[in-house]
Amino acid sequence: MTITPPGAPPGMPPNHPEGLPPNVPPVPLYPHNRVRRHLSELFRLALPVVIARLGMLIMAVVDTIIVGNYDSASLAYLNIAHAPFTSLMVTGIGLLTGVMILTSHSVGRNNLREAGQTWRACMPYAVLIGIAFMVLTWKSDWLFMATGQPDEITEHASALAMILSIGMPGALIYITCSFFLEGLQRPLPGMVMMIGANFVNLVLDYGLVYGAFGLPEMGAEGAAWTSTVIRWVMAISLLAYILLMRSHSDYGIRDGFSGWWRHSRDARHMGYAAGASQGMETSAFAAMQLFAGRLGVVAAASYGITMTMLALMFMVALGLASATSVRVGIAYGRRDRPDMALAGWIGLLTTMTVMLLLSAPLYFFPGLVAHLFSQDATVIATTAGVLILMPIIFPTDGGQNAAISALRGAGDKWVPTILHLVSYICVMIPAGYYLTFVAGLGVAGLFWGIVIASLVAVSGLAIRFAIVSSRPIKAYQQ
């Protein structure tokens, strides 16, 4: 006979150690049962998160395929325009990471109103970041000129960056709402919304790029406008879901935003480190994109296609990493160090295994994959030559993201950021530049730089998690 411990949330399975208040001890589990439970919960939470994250990138893949088949030059313009936008958006995602982590900590303590307060405090913060980053993206022309982009690329990419910038606030509002629901272990609404958005994106993208269905033919601008409109529709829809969900009163969702700056302090401080970390990593990859632009249109298009595939598969790693962060965060909220360590290691090893399996098609069929994105024989040949490196890049890049997410869930802030600084700013950019321009490897040199940096990152972060997960966890202070 099993008994559900008192204080467990409604629907919690018997003998389940999560969601209990601090004064209710969990039912002991044997080691193999704990591993099985973590794997089960990891995939249960990660699957909808992976689908939602994949949805974000599938829209970019659709843009790349449609625009790439429309015109290779237009694809190069769109890829370059995405460099500053993506860099700032991912920085914003990092700044808002505290929403998910602190929400999961509150769930671990079974404090629902505290979780709701985290969301209410961080919504105005997300809007503020979104407006600031919109202005910076709008003014991207100086970046293209400063990095030596050809005049033709600078002109067209600047116009596309202005269109993309309008969707920045919407993207960060959506991320804030999505992080809150994921911290509550309720990722399904974000997944369903993302699936619907992808169907709309496919039709509208094709229509506006090629002038189909009676819509104007706009080329790459059509893809940019489609992305911007969809980001705002998703933001408004997920915001409405949270405001109207049945349990909104349990979380105090409609209690207003008074004192949001003070109440968002812990989430902001956690986000500063995560934002700096993700911002540096994404900026480093943007620098590599700009290096590719200096090599010409073919190199920029090839790099963009390969990075689209890397980013697409990285969304799988990001979903698993987000689930790892929540799993570690809940154990951290309960002050259960062994369970926290187990959750982190399972998340890291599972992510690296899954990413290795996903790299196989790109390794064995690189030409076929490249042909999906372009009809240009030169672009296809160049892209196929670098796709064979993905079995090294996928597991290490995905693994470093899982490791850093586990560290964030455990409350570690600045050391992971320093490790990212070393790996991507101090290692990847110099190595990529040297191998590309000095050693003369061309686009392949950029990806060998990524290989080196990813190996450094995953090794350093795994060692750091081993250190952090072996320490006693301090008692929670009200």
Image (cartoon, rainbow, N blue to C red):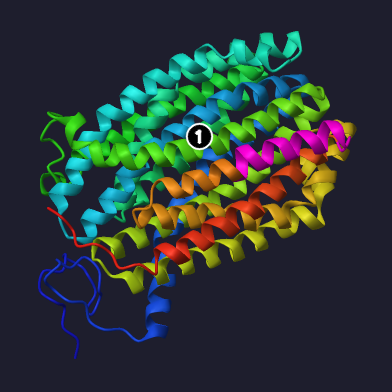
The residue sitting at 17% across, 68% down in the picture is 20
Location of mark 1 (residue): 279
The spot of residue 380 in percent (x, y) is 84, 38
Front residue (pair 162, 338): 338
The spot of residue 214 in percent (x, y) is 59, 16
Q: Can residue 319 be seen in this view?
A: yes
Q: Does the magenta stretch include residue 436?
A: yes
Q: Is residue 216 visible?
A: no
Q: From which residue to which does the magenta span run?
A: 423-441
Q: In this view, does 235 lie above or below 312?
A: above
- Left or right, 356 with respect to 133, comes to right
Q: Can you name the residue that lies furthest to the bottom here?
A: 1
Front residue (pair 163, 127): 127
Amino acid bearing label 1: Gly
Picture quadrant of residue 212: top right
- Left or right, 454 with respect to 191, comes to right
Picture quadrant of residue 422: top right
